[in-house]
Amino acid sequence: MDRLLTSRHGPWVTGGILGLVAVLLVRLGNPGNMGFCVACFTRDIAGALGLHRAAVVQYLRPEIPAFILGSFLSALAFGEYAPRSGSSPVVRFFLGVCAMFGALVFLGCPWRAYLRLAGGDWNALYGIGGLIVGVLMGIAFLWNGFSLGAAERSPRASGLVMPFIALVLLALVVLKPLFGPEGTGPIFFSEKGPGAQHAPLLVSLAAGLLVGWLAQRSRFCTVGALRDLLMMGDGHLFKGIVAFTLAAFAASYALGYFHPGFEKQPVAHTQSLWNFMGMVLSGLAFTLAGGCPGRQLIMTGEGDGDAAVFVLGMLTGAALAHNFSTASSGAGVGPAGIPATIVGLVFCLAVGFACRTRSA
């Protein structure tokens, strides 16, 4: 099996399993078209930690720490655990913030964009179009020498920080400690809304560990797939996106979750321009940082401290998005969502121009 995963067939094998498992998680309780969504799940974790107080999106999603642990175990097992860091960490942090701002304007990461499309949500077409444009913008910078610098090897113990945090998060979701006044906090759980919809803990944990393992071995990455296809004509990783979407569509159709249209889609809005622009921002930020949010989580399990900084930026961005009303809802883009998207794009473009090692 490992030989298959590490071959050129690995991405589509991983993508197919990922798409199937994502829809099964919806069947078992996760929100509609949200079997896996790194952005939405990170937002829920930020809420559960009290970093924002949007009561309908607070839950310590086990899938996120399980992705990290699955990748960590895989990297250890196959000798690929290699702690490294030092490649423009502050810039990466704010790229993570910007990526989350864009994703929460659209309401989903690249993984969820394809899951929404597979479930018949045609609003996702605008998001995927925006993602492609954002990746193309990032490619333009890469062609002109963009680089955040080389990472350096770090002490082996430094790579254990994110797996340790993952274990702490899993402990918190099990123990549900209540230390605050009147039995509230420090961990918060939604009583209604998307945050209250989740598959059983052990199922979510097992699914996350499986996906973390598979993605680490196959290098599955939805943004890297578009980058390689559009930049070099290499469709190796893109097969993973195709398999992911087709498997999710087949499972959604079989289980009665395929409902084509623009209106009344789960956790989605119909403001097409900002579905597009939100993912332009995310696509650009992910490309400059070197991978989609799922890939960033997987790299943290391998010991990549720079990816860990990006993930922490996403967590912070999720908190800021809700505290400053930039996140969208089913009713539409948040009051500050449009200016936040514009500011995020300006920042990412500035990074792209400033970090070129050679001029056009």
Image (cartoon, rainbow, N blue to C red):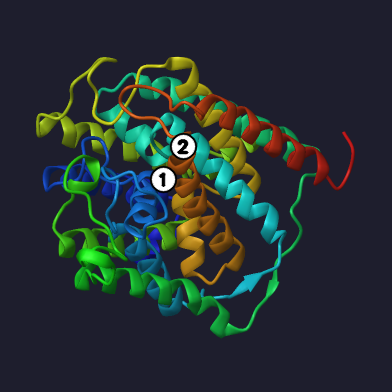
Screen quadrant of the N terminus = bottom left
Q: Position of residue 89 (x, y in %)?
A: 67, 60
Q: Is residue 220 visible?
A: no
Mark 1 vs 2: CB contact within 8 A: yes
Point out which mark residue 39 bears: 1
- Nearer to me, 226 or 83: 83
Point out which mark residue 112 bears: none
Please state which amino acid type lies under the numbered disc 1: Ala
Classify 79 as above or below 94.
below
Kindly state the secondary structure of the residue where label 2 is placed.
helix
Q: Is residue 35 visible?
A: yes
Q: Which residue, given by chain and number where applicable, does mark 2 sit on?
A: 103
Kindly state the secondary structure of the residue where label 1 is placed.
helix
- Nearer to me, 138 or 269: 269
Rendering quarter of residue 250: top left
- Nearer to me, 224 or 264: 264
